[in-house]
Every structure is written in C-alpha cells, then in structure tokens.
Amino acid sequence: MTSKITIIDYGLGNLLSISNMLNYLNIEYEISSNPRQIANSQKLIIPGVGSFDNAINLLQKNKIYDSIIKAFESDVIILGICLGMQILYEKSDEGMQNGLSILKGKVVKFKITDNLIIPHIGWNSINSNNISHFKLRNKKFYFLHSYHPELSIKQNFDSVKYSYNFPAIIKQNNVYGVQFHPEKSGDNGMQFFREFNLL
C-alpha cells in the first residue's frame, strides 16, 4: 500500500535532494507549507538542516507546528530526517525552545571522549535491525550532526556506533525518525525511501 507523501517546507532542509530522489524513484509527493494541507496529509516528511531553536521558531511562525501535532494525532505516518527527527522530541541541548513533544525524551550533544571528532560526518553502518520493516543492518548511510536522541525504552530503535551507540532510526507508533540523511545515502537511501513509501 502506498499513499502520497507531503514534504514539509518550513524553511530548513534538503528539499531539493529529497524531491530529486523521490522523482528518480517515481514516488508520488508534494512540497507544502500550507498548515491545513499538512494536517490532512497521508504521509509527512519533516526535513531538517540547521539548529533546533530556529526550526521550532520557523514552524511556529509558519503556523505548521500545530499541524504536525494534528497529523500525528490523526495517525498520519511521519518521518523526521536529522534535525527533522530531533524537533519531534521534548527538548534539546542545542537550544531553549520546547520541541513538538511527539516523542518523549531529549536530544543531547555528543559526549566528549578520546579522539571523538564533532560533528559526526560521513558514512557509518547500522549495527542492529530491530525495526523490521527497514532492512538496515550493516548498511551504510550518510551522517552529519553534533546532537542525537538519548536511548529510550519508549521507542524502538536501530543503533549506530560513533565512539558509543546512539539511535540511528527510531519508531514509535506512526512516527519514524532517522539521524542519517537517506537523501544523501545513494542506493541504500533509495531503498529506504522505497520501503517508507510502502508503509
């Protein structure tokens, strides 16, 4: 089963990269900043590149903040990518604003350990496969971030290791989030979007 995807345009994110990949895969989508349209979507993608507080401020300024919550409450399937996942949480070490609080927990900065370079940039392999719909174990995806969600027993997750394990993809009810950028992850990213399209 497939349904049309709405990519949220709130001022941050790789809209062109995502849309180019979906076009290549012949996956039906639209890009929208219309709050009503977003609230009544079938599937949502929340992209994100930038800072936590700026993202929340833009969602509120463009009246999209409440629309995402309404979509979640209506069981719309939601995918947050990188910062787009982080803003689904309650708080972040990166800023002072409250997140969407759709996911319980906090986004934290990487713990400083020996030889750890921040931000985490480049290709890394997923080391688990708890979210069975996505066959990600041992597949490499592209990461670019300095913050990540805390491990939480409230969310099902697959992890990646960068000095220590942290969530690479999470699932809770109708919400999915990825810390990596599938739109920049080549063949593995394409497969990820194909599988997301079938949810």
Image (cartoon, rainbow, N blue to C red):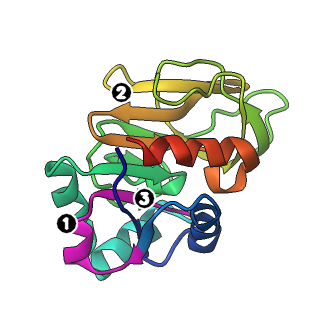
The span shown in magenta is 31-49
Which residue is label 2 attached to? 155
Q: Amino acid at mark 1?
A: Asn
Q: Is there a contact, CB below 8 Å, between mark 1 and mark 2? A: no
Residue nearest the viewer, comparing 165 with 67: 67
Q: CA distance from mark 1 to mark 2?
A: 25 Å
Q: Quick one: label 1 or label 3, which is nearer the N terminus?
A: 1
- Percent of width and height locating residue 125: 73, 29
Quadrant of the rendered image containing residue 118: top right
Separation of residues labelled 3 and 2 (CA atoms) = 19 Å
Q: How many numbered discs?
A: 3
Mark 3–mark 2 contact, CB under 8 Å? no
Q: Is residue 23 left or right of residue 31?
A: right
Q: Secondary structure at mark 1?
A: loop
x then y, percent, for residue 84: 46, 56
Q: Which residue is mark 3?
A: 45
Residue of label 1 = 40
